[in-house]
Image (cartoon, grey):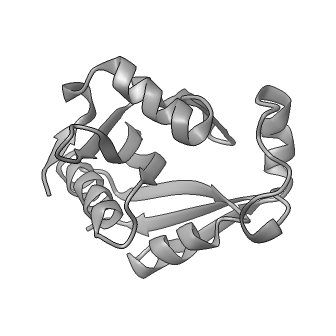
Amino acid sequence: MIIFEIDELSRDQVIGFFKAHWGSSEMVISSGIYDCSELDGFIVVNDENEIIGLITYIIAFNECEIISLDCIEEGKGIGSALVQEVENLAVKKKCKIIKLITTNDNLLALKFYQKRGFYLSKILINAVEKARKLKPEIPLVGNDGIPIRDEIELEKLLS
């Protein structure tokens, strides 16, 4: 598996990926509003040069925040490799912590990140209702029929 920096692909291809899998490249979470197609990140592509994994992040004040992670082919280590790539970069940039936000319905993400050393650090009650005011297309119901209401912040201390 070869990991590339996101800017090695055309911006149109990155935007197309976000539109196909997230509805748009805009991410609205309690830490901010982001156009993921403009963020730093890493990608994995298949033999046809199609994106099969993509992660975006921001670094500020010795903290790294993962903004998005999406893998088309699950169970192949793509997500783990992308998270590890961001962690390695965060350590090089002397970050003390890496964090991310997910929603209460995203049980797969909660399991995925906890298995990789992240811990639950904060629950932001009804945060998604506030995000919907800015991005109304956020669904009311998510994975497994769970109403999407809250954001959960996860953190991992870096050495």
**Residue situated in front as seen by the camera: 159 or 15:** 15
Residue 113 drawn above or below residue 14: below
Residue at 28 percent across and 20 percent down: it is 10
Coordinates of residue 87 in the picture (x, y in percent): 28, 58
Residue 21 drawn above or below residue 120: above
Residue at 27 percent across and 42 percent down: it is 42
Coordinates of residue 30 in the picture (x, y in percent): 69, 42
**Residue situated in front as seen by the camera: 122 or 105:** 105
| Outermost residue toward the left in this view | 2
Coordinates of residue 12 in the picture (x, y in percent): 38, 18
Report the number of discs: 0
Coordinates of residue 134 in the picture (x, y in percent): 79, 27
Looking at the rendering, in which quadrant would you find the C terminus?
A: bottom left
| Outermost residue toward the bottom in this view | 115
| Outermost residue toward the front in this view | 48
Q: Is residue 157 left or right of residue 159?
A: right
Residue at 78 percent across and 34 percent down: it is 137
Looking at the rendering, in which quadrant would you find the N terminus?
A: bottom left
Residue 55 drawn above or below residue 99: above
**Residue situated in front as seen by the camera: 102 or 136:** 136
